[in-house]
Amino acid sequence: APLRRASFRLSVTQAGQLPPDDGAEVAIAGRSNVGKSSTINMLTERRALARVSRTPGRTQAINVFDLDPGQRLIDLPGYGYAKVPEALRRSWGPLLEQYLRRRSSLQALILVMDIRHPYSPHDADLISFAAGCGRPVHILLNKADKLSRGAALQEMARLRRIPELQGVAMQLFSAQTGQGLDELHQHIAGWLGA
Ligand code: GDP
């Protein structure tokens, strides 16, 4: 699994600071507290990586992790942080938009949601923007362990009926138990051409 060889490369706050736009990369996004760091940890089996993502000043940056040569995992700024000053919030919107619009090596956007309160207005904005850029979106309904299997499946079925989510892939996930991890690894291997 190439993700196990992940290593932190750099944090960028401007698109011009990103590594060369070659090879293949997969980006991961999500509102704060949905479990994005936990998901990165579980994917990479490297506890230190998420600590990097949480370093103050880096939560609002794009964090780049190198996988195998020519393959990257991109940790996008968390959104919905109540504490973030408005000026900072205004500055990362354009960075995110520019990244999603222009990055040729970007293969797919993984969007982490908390299955107990998924599909926030921020999520909806991001999905419609990504769709407009022609980016495949893959939703992780994280913390599925907090619901019974039946309730989790029911919630996923409800989301699948939302018109704006037609054509958006989604799966149950738990960054705590590893539920859905094999399925996610398979998708990532496909996107990265591994
Ligand atoms: P982030 O802000 O999106 O990076 O979220 P974190 O990864 O820091 O997770 C936020 C909180 O949710 C932490 O207390 C995690 O332990 C918890 N958490 C994350 N994923 C899961 C999950 O799949 N199941 C459960 N039960 N808790 C989770």
Image (cartoon, rainbow, N blue to C red):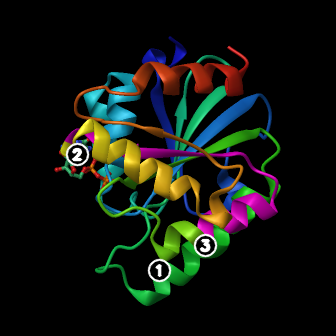
Q: State if disc 3 and disc 1 touch (CB < 8 Å).
A: no
Where residue 14 sits, quadrant-wise, is bottom right
Q: Determine which residue is flagged by label 2.
A: 147
Q: Is residue 153 left or right of residue 157?
A: left
Mark positioned earlier in the residue sequence (2 or 3): 3
Quarter placement of the C terminus: top right
| Depth order, front residue of 156/43 | 156
**Which secondary structure lies at badge 2?**
loop
* Mark 1 or 3: the one toward you: 3
Q: In the figure, 84 relative to 77: above or below?
A: below
* Mark 2 or 3: the one toward you: 2
Residue 53 x %, y %: 37, 48
**How far apart, in angstroms, are the residues tagged by discs 1 and 2?**
35 Å
Magenta-drawn segment: 125-145
Mark positioned earlier in the residue sequence (1 or 2): 1
- Mark linked to residue 88: 1
- Mark 1 is surrounded, within 10 Å at the Cα level, by few (under 14), some (14 to 19) or many (20 or more) other residues, namely few
Q: In the figure, 103 relative to 190: above or below?
A: below
Residue type marked 1: Leu
Q: In this view, does 86 lie to the left or right of 187?
A: left
Residue type marked 2: Leu
- Mark linked to residue 32: none
| Depth order, front residue of 143/1 | 143
**Which residue is depicted at the point 45% across and 48% down?**
156
Q: Determine which residue is flagged by label 3.
A: 125
Residue type marked 3: Asp
